[in-house]
Amino acid sequence: MRGQRRRMGKGRRRPPKAFPGKYFENLKRVVMDRYCSNCSACVAACPVRGISITSYSSPPYFPGWEEDCTDCGFCVRVCPRWDYKPLSGIGLYFEIMAVKSKRFKGQDGGAVTEILASAMERGIIDSALVVRRDEKWKPEAFIATNVEEVIEASGTKYSHAFPLSALKAGGYEKIAIVGTPCVASAARKLQREVGKFSKKIAMVVSLFCMENFYYPKLVEFLEKKGVNLESVEKMDIKKGKFYAYPDISFPVKELDEIVPEGCKVCQDFTGVESDVSVGSVGSPDGYSTVIIRNESLLDLIKSADVEIEKANVKAVEKLAEFKVKMHSG
Ligand SMILES: Cc1cc2nc3c(=O)[nH]c(=O)nc-3n(C[C@H](O)[C@H](O)[C@H](O)COP(=O)(O)OP(=O)(O)OC[C@H]3O[C@@H](n4cnc5c(N)ncnc54)[C@H](O)[C@@H]3O)c2cc1C
């Protein structure tokens, strides 16, 4: 027992199990088989490196878990969907503004790229967990260690990139995490539950999110519509429509059939647990809406090379309420 407590960290207790069996089996049956968010915090936290991304069309898995899982409980402790109580609303904040970077082009105003680059240039972070893509839009999470790599990752990829799994690569002391609201919540759990992450995660940036998709399903869907992915310059969801520029647009409702189960239970549109949330709704074209929840980021953003306008807070609140309505039944 003494040894067990030492392994779990001082004062840490193993969480109650839903049923007898190893923790991984608990996680699989309670979360992965039902409503996994695909944040992949469990991959980052698994001390035996058994949990991994085995496919882009399903949650992480632990091949051979029956023998190799040590039943430490970390996977359950960092999972944002274990003992799930959905978060919602636009959360607490210091300021909301519409931001456009004067230096970088991004999905909207390039605000995420600007925040990460400015924080890197000032030594607030030494790296950023971001997502780039290949020519067929397959997302790849990686740790950017310079501004060029941050720029390479700009733009939205509407598919699960299992970002937190990339934390396993190491090599950072002050990292910014960028991801959807489930990833922001998972990053907070990693900070709280896993000693090595508590100091190393220096900033959490959440992207507004209504839903995300498994890459193979999205590709299949778009190819059936005649889209040649290699010629797509940008994907976007705006005012109820999905755009794959320059080819096609269609009502986003058509994608309902491929929304993963894990997104159907989520009610958090903005990522209320983040340090800063960034999205499109609430700002004029070419700007990003930025919700600043950590006071230390106010100065960073205001002194960055940006144009700032007033954001439409009501529009953000309306969409946050809509997500709750959509996903509470
Ligand atoms: C799946 C998804 C759904 C979204 N839905 C909405 C929505 O309904 N309404 C809305 O207003 N905004 C939504 N957004 C946010 C919006 O698309 C922009 O990402 C946001 O406005 C930031 O724009 P920017 O120009 O400031 O970012 P940029 O400067 O272009 O930077 C974008 C950052 O996002 C990261 N990123 C891109 N794709 C992913 C991914 N799949 N997972 C993790 N990180 C990623 C990149 O690494 C990059 O650092 C969504 C984003 C995603 C990823």
Image: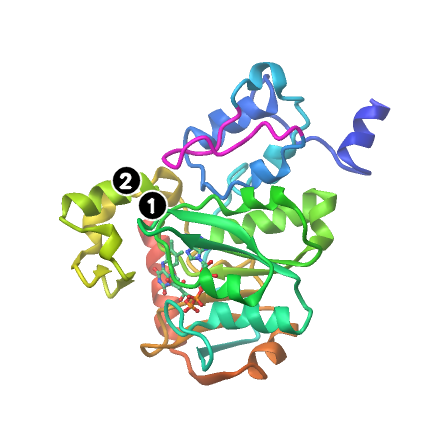
Instruction: Identify the residue at image location x=50%, y=60%.
Output: 206
Query: What range is drawn magenta here?
Result: 48-62
Identify the secondary structure beneath mark 2.
Answer: helix
Give whichever of 16, 116 is nearer the camera. Answer: 116
Say whether residue 111 is left or right of residue 211. Answer: right
Q: Where is residue 321? Give x, y as percent.
A: 37, 60
Instruction: Identify the residue at image location x=53%, y=25%.
Output: 62
Mark 1 and ligand 1: say if the CB distance to the nearest ligand atom is below 8 Å.
Answer: yes
Q: Where is residue 294? Give x, y as percent.
A: 62, 69
| The disc label shown at residue 270, or none | none
- Does residue 61 show up magenta in the picture? yes
Q: Where is residue 214? Give x, y as percent.
A: 34, 41
Q: Residue 180: tell me if it is visible.
A: no
Instruction: Identify the residue at image location x=47%, y=43%.
Output: 162
Q: Residue furthest right?
A: 2
Do the numbered discs 2 and 1 sit on residues whose CB atoms are within 8 Å? Answer: yes
Residue that carries the numbered disc 1 in the rendered image: 213
Instruction: Identify the residue at image location x=69%, y=48%.
Output: 197
Give whichever of 135, 263 is nearer the camera. Answer: 135
Marks counted in the figure total: 2
Q: Residues within 10 Å of mark 2 (few under 14, many from 20)?
A: some
Please name the amino acid that badge 2 sits on: Lys
- Does residue 39 show up magenta in the picture? no
Residue that carries the numbered disc 2 in the rendered image: 217
